[in-house]
Amino acid sequence: MEGESAGDASGASASPKPLTAAQKQLVKRQQELEHWKIQSKRLRSRNLITGLAIGAFVVGLFSYTILSVKQERIMDEIDDEAKVFIMKGPRTGANS
């Protein structure tokens, strides 16, 4: 351990060597990779929120459509019953 600390001290006093082009490119690639890792996490969460919002909209629209069609059928049945009732005429004590 003592040898390591002595080596560190001597290395710190010397001026740092300039990076070669390959080393600069490697550092740049590593920085880009870290940037994309962070961005991909954000993008995944945004995509999840967007997907859930679209899914909720589709389910709501489908439910609304089914409900309105069902009500339309009920209204048609009521209209048919009303037509039959009108055709028969009103029920009074004289024609019952």
Image (cartoon, rainbow, N blue to C red):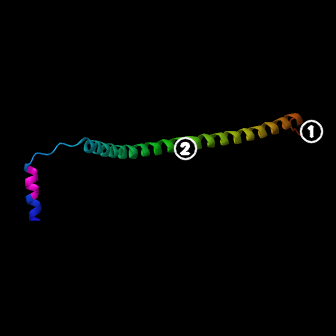
- Observer-side mark, 1 or 2, equals 2
Q: Nearer the viewer, residue 86 or 73?
A: 73
Residue 5 covered by magenta stretch:
no
Q: Quadrant of the N terminus?
A: bottom left
| Amino acid carrying mark 1 in the image | Asn
Q: Are marks 1 and 2 in contact (CB under 8 Å)?
A: no
Q: Residues within 10 Å of mark 1 (few under 14, many from 20)?
A: few
Tell me the tag on residue 61.
Answer: none
User: Is 47 left or right of 88, judged from the image as shown?
Assistant: left
Report x, y in % for residue 37.
Answer: 36, 47
Magenta highlight range? 7-12
Tell me the tag on residue 95.
Answer: 1
Q: Quadrant of the C terminus?
A: top right
User: Is 28 left or right of 87, judged from the image as shown?
Assistant: left
Q: Residues within 10 Å of mark 2 (few under 14, many from 20)?
A: few
Residue 10 covered by magenta stretch:
yes
Residue drawn at point x = 43 percent, y = 42 percent: 46
| Amino acid carrying mark 2 in the image | Gly
User: Is 92 left or right of 40, judged from the image as shown?
Assistant: right
Residue drawn at point x = 70 percent, y = 42 percent: 70
Alpha-carbon span between mark 1 and mark 2: 58 Å
Disc 2: which residue: 55
Residue drawn at point x = 70 percent, y = 40 percent: 69
Report x, y in % for residue 80.
Answer: 81, 38
Residue drawn at point x = 7 percent, y = 49 percent: 13
- Height in image: 10 above or below 31? below
Q: Nearer the viewer, residue 25 or 61?
A: 25
